């Protein structure tokens, strides 16, 4: 199993976030898991961007130790909540969008619990994931111009 | 850092358009957006100031179809070009797989081009990229304006690595897809993860 499959496998066994819009996103904004009808690629880019910007803003303070940050942008019943966590040595974000929530604090708590379990599950599979994902050589040794042209055929002959 | 999913046969790559302010980065991806059919393009988002200058980034996801059985998805980003947004540019370069440097061909913008190129090199080096290996394409934009520098001189000054380069007039679309195709090809050829 690769990382994406491992995440899907884990999430499918969980029910606590069933009715929520959430995304698991890499540092570069690529979405590894989506549980939402919203545009996942847009959500991934924005979740990653807002986290990076907030982290950079916080780093203006001369702090001596790195804390585990959480990012909230919310009212009493709707908003965005983002958590940062590590899997197989890399940073990821879990971004939640919610509305009409009676108890957002409880929801955030559920999310933190979910992330802890996910980290534990994925890191337990670490050796298996790495074996299947680490590849040394190049995926394509050559590509012809006509293959690239075919990818961009939508551009109407440009 | 590109992401290849061998199980679903998907490739995801990040391309960043970099360059001086008002050089035509946003216009490049707006043209791509306009020419893209519904099934291929996602929504384009622009985080702008009130006067339409890029504040944080523009983002355009492109689902391009298959190449050798792999579904290919490119994420196009632009950085804000204005000098004082350096911190944002650093953030957007994280995880980049390929860069398009959009230079402004007007003679009076050469200093801005140099400054932007130096900032690109510094930011990539700080993030651990090997500048010799990262796919890079240069576009000399605004070739339709009267006060442009000759192309050979621009090449001499801005493209010392002799990476692929193109002349462009982004607001008419000239050179936009040539540039994007080239950087896409270089990025795909640079993906680690052979099937052998």
Image: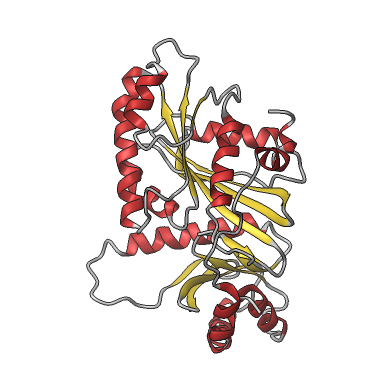
Left or right of B33? Residue B99 is left
Q: How is the image coloured?
A: secondary structure
Q: Quadrant of the C terminus of chain A?
A: top right
Residue B156: x %, y % from top left = 34, 26
Q: Quadrant of the N terminus of chain A?
A: bottom right
Between residue A40 and residue A54, name the one nearer to us.
A40
Between residue A23 and residue B18, name the one nearer to us.
B18
Left or right of A28? Residue B115 is left
Residue visible at 33% across and 64% down in the picture: A58
Residue A101: x %, y % from top left = 64, 73
Residue visible at 66% across and 83% down in the picture: A10
Res A146 quadrant in image: top right
Total tally of numbered discs in the picture:
0
- The correct choice, above or below, for A76 with respect to A124 in the image is above
Res B7 quadrant in image: bottom right
Residue A144: x %, y % from top left = 65, 42
Residue A148: x %, y % from top left = 66, 41
Res A155 quadrant in image: top right
Q: Is residue A110 visible?
A: no
Residue visible at 46% across and 63% down in the picture: A51
Residue visible at 41% across and 29% down in the picture: B103
Q: Is residue A60 visible?
A: yes
Between residue B73 and residue B196, name the one nearer to us.
B196
């Amino acid at each position: 199993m690769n990382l994406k499959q491992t995440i899907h496998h884990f999430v499918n066994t969980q029910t606590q976030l069933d009715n929520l819009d959430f995304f698991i996103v890499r540092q570069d904004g690529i979405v590894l898991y989506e549980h939402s009808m919203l545009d996942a690629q847009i959500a991934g880019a924005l979740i990653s961007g807002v986290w990076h910007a907030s982290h950079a803003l916080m780093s203006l303070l001369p702090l001596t130790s790195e804390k585990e940050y959480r990012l909230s942008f919310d009212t009493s019943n709707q908003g965005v909540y983002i958590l940062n966590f590590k899997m197989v040595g890399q940073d990821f974000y879990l971004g939640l969008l919610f509305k009409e929530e009676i108890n957002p604090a409880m929801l955030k708590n559920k999310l933190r619990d979910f992330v802890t379990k996910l980290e534990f599950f994925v890191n337990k599979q670490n050796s298996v994931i790495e074996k299947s994902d680490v590849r040394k050589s190049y995926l394509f040794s050559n590509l012809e111009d006509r293959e690239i042209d075919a990818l961009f055929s939508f551009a109407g002959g440009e | 850092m590109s992401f290849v999913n061998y199980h679903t046969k998907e490739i995801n790559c990040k391309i960043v358009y970099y360059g001086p302010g008002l050089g035509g980065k946003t216009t490049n991806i707006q043209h791509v957006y306009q020419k893209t059919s519904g099934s291929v393009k996602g929504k384009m988002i622009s985080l702008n100031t009130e006067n339409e200058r890029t504040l944080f980034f523009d983002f355009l996801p492109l689902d391009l179809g298959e190449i050798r059985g792999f579904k290919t998805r490119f994420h196009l980003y632009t950085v804000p070009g204005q000098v004082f947004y350096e911190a944002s540019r650093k953030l957007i370069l994280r995880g980049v797989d390929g860069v398009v440097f959009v230079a402004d061909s007007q003679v009076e913008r050469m200093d801005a081009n140099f400054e932007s190129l130096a900032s690109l090199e510094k930011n990539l080096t700080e993030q651990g990229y090997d500048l010799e290996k990262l796919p890079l394409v240069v576009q000399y934009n605004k070739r339709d304006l009267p006060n442009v520098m000759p192309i050979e001189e621009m090449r001499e000054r801005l493209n010392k690595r002799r990476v692929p380069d193109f002349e462009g007039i982004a607001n008419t679309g000239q050179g936009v897809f040539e540039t994007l195709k080239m950087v896409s090809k270089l990025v795909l050829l640079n993906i680690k993860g052979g099937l052998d």
